[in-house]
Amino acid sequence: MHDPVQAGQELRRCVKELGFHGALLNGIQHAGKDGETYFFYDQPEYDEFWKVAVELDVPVYIHPAAPQRQYYQQQWVGRKYLVGLPFFATGNGVSLHLLGLITNGVIDRFQQLRAIVGHLGEHISFDFGELIIG
C-alpha cells in the first residue's frame, strides 16, 4: 500500500489470476528511516486503489495493527494489558481509517466500495454516532 497504483495492480492480479475474493489491508503503513511516515488510505492518491476494488467488486478488510510507535510510549507503555484488545486499542486505528474514508469523501466517490470491519465493529458505530451528534 506504499504505492496505490501498484497495490491496485497487485489486487487485480490476485483476484484475476489467483482467485482471491478480496483484500486485507493493515490498518496503517509505515515508511521512512524510523518508520515514522504514515500512509492513510483516505487520501486522494489512494483513489487508484479503491477504483480497482470497486471495478473488481471485491471487499476490502481493514485489519487492526498495534498502536503506532510514536504514540506507544505516550499512551500505552504503562497500560500493557490494554494493548491489543480488539474492541479498544486496535479499534482506535481502524476507526480512524474508516471515519477517514467516510469524512474525506472516499465513500462518496466509490459508493459501491465494500469494507469489512472485524472485531465487533472496532467501535465504529459509537465513533460514527459521535461524529454525527458531536
Image: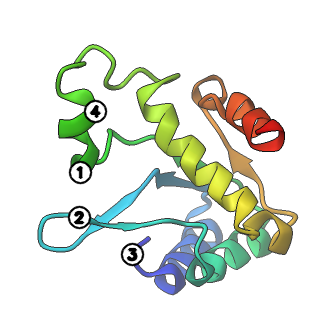
128 is higher (above) or lower (below) than 18: above
Assign the N terminus to one quadrant of the image: bottom left
Q: Nearer the viewer, mark 3 or mark 1?
A: 1
83 is higher (above) or lower (below) than 48: above
Of labels 4 and 1, earlier in sequence is 1
**Residue at 52%, 22% in the rendered image:** 87
Q: Can you identify the residue that label 3 sits on?
A: 2
Q: Can you identify the residue that label 1 sits on?
A: 70
Q: Are marks 1 and 2 in contact (CB under 8 Å)?
A: yes
Where does residue 34 sit, x and y in percent of width and height? 13, 65
Q: Can you identify the residue that label 2 sits on?
A: 36
Residue 44's mark? Answer: none
Q: Secondary structure at mark 2?
A: loop
Amino acid type, residue under disc 4 in the picture: Gln
Where does residue 80 sit, x and y in percent of width and height? 22, 19
Of labels 3 and 1, earlier in sequence is 3
Spatial CA distance of label 2 from label 4 is: 16 Å
Q: Can you identify the residue that label 4 sits on?
A: 75
